Image (cartoon, helix red, strand yellow):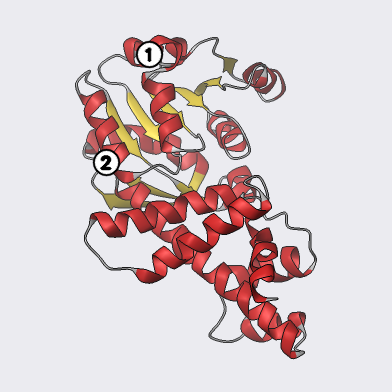
C-alpha cells in the first residue's frame, strides 16, 4: 500500500522504517526542517514537502507528542492542507497517545469527508519500535478500514489488540501508562524509604523482582536507570505525566471516584515541573526525594 507517516522522531522514525521494510510505498513528513529528507536519504522512502502531499496515500499514520498536536497537524497546519486534500476512502491511524474524547471528535470531522480515523497507540518504547515488536491497541468503528490498516500495523507490532470503538485504544494506552506510573511512584518511594532505613537498594530490587512487588519499574528502571543515576529509560516525564492526566480525566468523565489516579497525576505533574519536562520519567525520584528528606 501507499503509506504516509507523519512524525518520524524517537518512536516514529523506527516505526516508519519498519513500514518500509514491510514492502509498502512510504512517504514521510515531519515538522522539524530537514528530518523527512534525512530519513528518505538514509533509510529510504520519499519525503513529502507538505501535509497536503502526504494526504495522497491509502493509509496515513500519525506519531506525534499529543492529541492537540495531531489535530492541529491534520486540520489546521498549512491552512488545513491535509484535511482539504484527504479523499474519501483514506484511513488515518493515530498511533500517538491522544485524549479519547478528542479522538472521537476528530473522527467526526474526518467522517464528514469520507475519511476513517482509527486510534492505535503503542507500548514498548524505542527498542521494540526498532525491532517491530510493539504492542498496539486498536480502536475504531469501521471494520473494513481496520482490516485495510492491519498489514501496516503488523509491520510495527507483534501483539495487536482490538479494544473496541474509536477512542478505546487511546483510553487503554492512558490506563496502561497510569498503572506503570503508579508502579514507578511506589518503587521510587520504597527505594527512598529503604535508603533512609539502611536497606541496600540493589538488594531490595532483587527481592522485589522475585516477590509480589515486581513491576515494570522494579524490573526495568530501578537498577538500570535510577540506582545507576543514568535516568535514560527513553520516555520523558512530561509524556508520562500527560498520559496519567488523560487517565485521571477519563475517570472523572465516566463518573468514577479514583483518588489514586488523581494522586499519581499530581505526583508526576510535580515531578515534571521540578525536574523539567524533557527529563526521563525515571528521574522523577529526584523531585520526590526532596519531599521525603
**Which residue: 36% across, 70% down?**
259
Q: Tell me if 43 is positioned left or right of 171 in this view.
A: right
Measuring from the top left, give residue 17's x and y in whole percent. 60, 32
Measuring from the top left, give residue 269's x and y in whole percent. 53, 55
**Which residue: 68% across, 78% down?**
191
Find residue 274 and report its image quarter.
Answer: bottom right
**Which residue: 33% across, 27% down?**
91
**Which residue: 56% across, 28% down?**
20
Q: Tell me if 21 is positioned left or right of 259 in this view.
A: right
The C terminus sits in image quarter: bottom right
The secondary structure type at the circle numbered 2 is loop
Find residue 221 and report its image quarter.
Answer: bottom right
Measuring from the top left, give residue 286's x and y in whole percent. 70, 63
In front: label 2 or label 1: 1
Measuring from the top left, give residue 40's x and y in whole percent. 65, 19
Whether residue 147 appears in this view of the structure is no
Query: For mark 2, does the 10 Å Cα neighbourhood hold few (<14), some (14 to 19), or many (20 or more) residues?
Result: many
Residue wearing tag 2: 140
Figure check: 136 above or below 4 = below
Cα gap from disc 2 to disc 1, whole angstroms: 24 Å
Which labelled disc corresponds to residue 15?
none
The N terminus sits in image quarter: top left
Figure check: 263 above or below 90 = below
Residue wearing tag 1: 80
Query: For mark 1, does the 10 Å Cα neighbourhood hold few (<14), some (14 to 19), or many (20 or more) residues?
Result: some
CB within 8 Å, label 2 to label 1 = no
Figure check: 133 above or below 53 = below
Amino acid at each position: 500500500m501507499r503509506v504516509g507517516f507523519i512524525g518520524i522522531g524517537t518512536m516514529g522514525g523506527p516505526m516508519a522504517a519498519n513500514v518500509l521494510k514491510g514492502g509498502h510505498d512510504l512517504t514521510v513528513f515531519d515538522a522539524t526542517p530537514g528530518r523527512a529528507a534525512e530519513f528518505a536519504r538514509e533509510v529510504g522512502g520519499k519525503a513529502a514537502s507538505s501535509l497536503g502531499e502526504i494526504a495522497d496515500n491509502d493509509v496515513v499514520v500519525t506519531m506525534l507528542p499529543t492529541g492537540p498536536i495531531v489535530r492541529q497537524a491534520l486540520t489546521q497546519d498549512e491552512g488545513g492542507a491535509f484535511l482539504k486534500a484527504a479523499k474519501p476512502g483514506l484511513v488515518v491511524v493515530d498511533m500517538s497517545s491522544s485524549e479519547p474524547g478528542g479522538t472521537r471528535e476528530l473522527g467526526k470531522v474526518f467522517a464528514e469527508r469520507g475519511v476513517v480515523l482509527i486510534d492505535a497507540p503503542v507500548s514498548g518504547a524505542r527498542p521494540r519500535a526498532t525491532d517491530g515488536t510493539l504492542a498496539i491497541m486498536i480502536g475504531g468503528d469501521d471494520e473494513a478500514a481496520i482490516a485495510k490498516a492491519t498489514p501496516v500495523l503488523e509491520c510495527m507490532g507483534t501483539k495487536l489488540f482490538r479494544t473496541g470503538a474509536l477512542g478505546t485504544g487511546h483510553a487503554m494506552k492512558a490506563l496502561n501508562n497510569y498503572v506503570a506510573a503508579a508502579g514507578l511512584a511506589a518503587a521510587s518511594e520504597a527505594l527512598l524509604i529503604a535508603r533512609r532505613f539502611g536497606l541496600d537498594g540493589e538488594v531490595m530490587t532483587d527481592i522485589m523482582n522475585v516477590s509480589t512487588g515486581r513491576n515494570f519499574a522494579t524490573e526495568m528502571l530501578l537498577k538500570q536507570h535510577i540506582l545507576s543515576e543514568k535516568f535514560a529509560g527513553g520516555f520523558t516525564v512530561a509524556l508520562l505525566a500527560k498520559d496519567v492526566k488523560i487517565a485521571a480525566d477519563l475517570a472523572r468523565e465516566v463518573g468514577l471516584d479514583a483518588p489514586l489516579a488523581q494522586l499519581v497525576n499530581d505526583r508526576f505533574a510535580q515531578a515534571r515541573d521540578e525536574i523539567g519536562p524533557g527529563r526521563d520519567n525515571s528521574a522523577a525520584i529526584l523531585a520526590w526525594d526532596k519531599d521525603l528528606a
